[in-house]
Amino acid sequence: MSEDLLTYCLAKPGAWQDEPWEGDVVVKVGDKIFAFLGEGTSIGLKCGRDRGEADELVHIYPDDVSASAYIGRYGWNSITVDGAVPPDELRELIDASYDAIVAKLPKSKRPKV
């Protein structure tokens, strides 16, 4: 896992690190995950409202982006870190995943910005 990506995720308002499964680091806002960092070389992010939207990224980077196991149908992708997806775009994807999850939180659980 890239420490830079973890640091970037944790800099978001209200973000906090959790390890709900041994060895699988996630970053949450409120009580919802917005980034799966695990211990591998990929990051799991919400990349669309549904599989169709998330597949747009898969078509652009077929060797480095794939539907996430189990939750892919809900618009989650697994993205290879240090692959074809440029670092700036990866940070934009983290931002979009965070924003999508915050938008679904009840107002009482949204971070104060």
Image (cartoon, grey):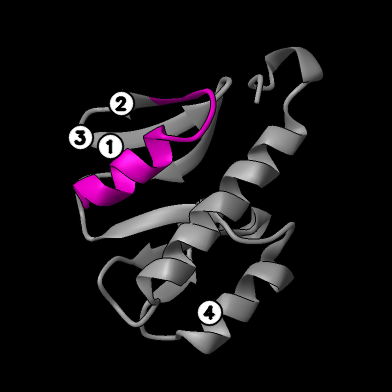
- Circles 2 and 4 in contact, beta carbons < 8 Å: no
Q: Position of residue 68 (x, y in %)?
A: 47, 59
Q: CA distance from mark 2 to mark 3?
A: 7 Å
User: Sequence order check: which comes first, mark 4 or mark 1?
Assistant: 1
Q: Determine the secondary structure under disc 1.
A: strand
- Determine which residue is flagged by label 3: 23
Q: CA distance from mark 2 to mark 1?
A: 6 Å
Q: Magenta stretch: give its range.
A: 1-16
Furthest residue in direction top, as rendered: 108
Q: Determine the secondary structure under disc 4.
A: helix
User: Sequence order check: which comes first, mark 2 or mark 1?
Assistant: 2
- Determine which residue is flagged by label 2: 19
What type is the residue that disc 3 sits on? Gly
- Determine which residue is flagged by label 1: 24
Q: Position of residue 15 (x, y in %)?
A: 47, 27
- Determine which residue is flagged by label 4: 58
Residue 67 relative to residue 25: left or right: right
- Circles 2 and 3 in contact, beta carbons < 8 Å: yes
User: Sequence order check: which comes first, mark 3 or mark 4?
Assistant: 3
What type is the residue that disc 4 sits on? Val
* Residue for point 68% across, 66% down: 51
Is residue 68 in view?
Answer: no
Label 4 Cα neighbours within 10 Å, binned few <14 / some 14-19 / many ≥20: some
